[in-house]
Image (tube, rainbow, N blue to C red):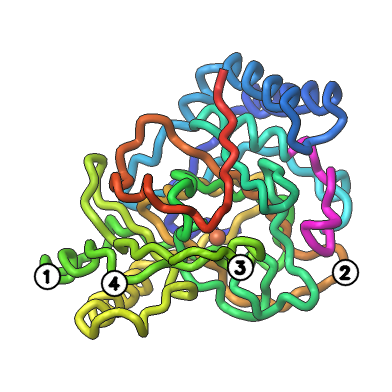
Amino acid sequence: MSTGSAPVRLLDDASLTELRHAAEEILAAAGTSATSPALLAAVARSAAALGAPIRHACRPVDTDDGLFVLRALAVDDTGIGSTPGSWATAGDRAAVHDIALLLLATVMGNPLAWEGQQDGRFVHNIVPSSGHERAQTGASSSVLLSPHTEDAFHPGRAHLLMLGCMRNHDAVATTAASICKVRLGDEDLAVLARPEVPILPDDAYAEARGFDGRPPNVPTLWESEDGRTLRFDPAYTPLDEATPEYRAAYRRLSEQLAAVSTAVSLAPGEVLIVDNDLVVHGRVPFRARYDGTDRWLKRALVRVPGRRTRPPAEATEHGYGQAAIEAHAA
Ligand SMILES: [Fe+2]
């Protein structure tokens, strides 16, 4: 399958086996990949013992692409069973890969979950769901999933997004556009750094959408101690409330992101790691099969301790009442 121009990192056979065995051992003891203190403690312990080659493969993104593809999981198309019809029925399907992904996430930082999403699990199942074809969430299929920062509405959003591929027979592409490749004038940069409009919670957060509180205005693009940072989700940004100047700058940013966008078609076993401060991601439209062979991704989120990319004002945001749960490395 094509990973486009995305940098690819490989794990050697010994490391693939090491990761797989570690995940199997944890799953055998826990019996499930659902969130529990015992599971998180076992993952933290095991991740701390993983060898140098795995740690090296999990180093931060080191190119302007703001992402990389890690070939890390040994996925057996028969063994994982059929693609679930929705996240709600996925349960423990392919649970060993949930745990492998969680181990990698723990090497990269602190895994993150949301109380209000997919039963508080640390690894989400992304599959097309009947009735959600046209939604702007991971359950959609027939529409373009617009480029966005993951969980852009929330100050506790992840620094890294991980998408592990279980199945992708139709080579459906994930799109990604890096702010490092965008060239904007100083005036546009100054305008987009102003907190002029809010970013509302997306449809995956039903409770947050009913939150009774004033949405905070947030900047779209700013310079942080750790470089330029993007917070962007046009599908949930009420731009009609912004000034014409802001709208024009936002449009130029959107156009530039579209121009530098790349497509990554993940193959089973590949994990796409996206820096969520630098890169917006989306998905091309596709026709769902709903026959158990649909595209199936596993998603994990990571907070990187010590990162200085978020402005202090974010600390005062209410996050629409959504609570992030952060697991800590050993
Ligand atoms: Fe997303």
Kind of residue indicated by mark 2 = Asp
Q: Dots 2 and 4: beta carbons under 8 Å? A: no
Kind of residue indicated by mark 1 = Glu
Q: Which mark is residue 187?
A: 1
Residue 230 occupies which quadrant of the picture?
Answer: bottom left
Q: Is residue 254 left or right of residue 147?
A: left
Residue 234 percent coordinates (x, y): 43, 73
Q: Nearer the viewer, residue 322 or 260?
A: 322
Residue 147 percent coordinates (x, y): 46, 68
Q: Is mark 3 within 8 Å of ligand 1?
A: no
Q: Is residue 229 visible?
A: yes
Q: Dots 1 and 2: beta carbons under 8 Å? A: no
What residue is shown with label 4?
Answer: 253
- The CA distance from mark 3 to mark 4 is 30 Å
Q: Which residues are magenta?
A: 84-97
Kind of residue indicated by mark 4 = Leu
Mark 3 or 1: in front is: 3
Q: Quadrant of the N terminus?
A: bottom right
How many other residues sit within 10 Å of disc 3, few (<14), some (14-19) or many (≥20)?
few
How many other residues sit within 10 Å of disc 4, few (<14), some (14-19) or many (≥20)?
many
Q: Which mark is residue 210?
A: 3
Number of marks in picture = 4
What residue is shown with label 2?
Answer: 291
Residue 75 percent coordinates (x, y): 75, 43
Helix or strand or loop: what does disc 3 sit on? loop
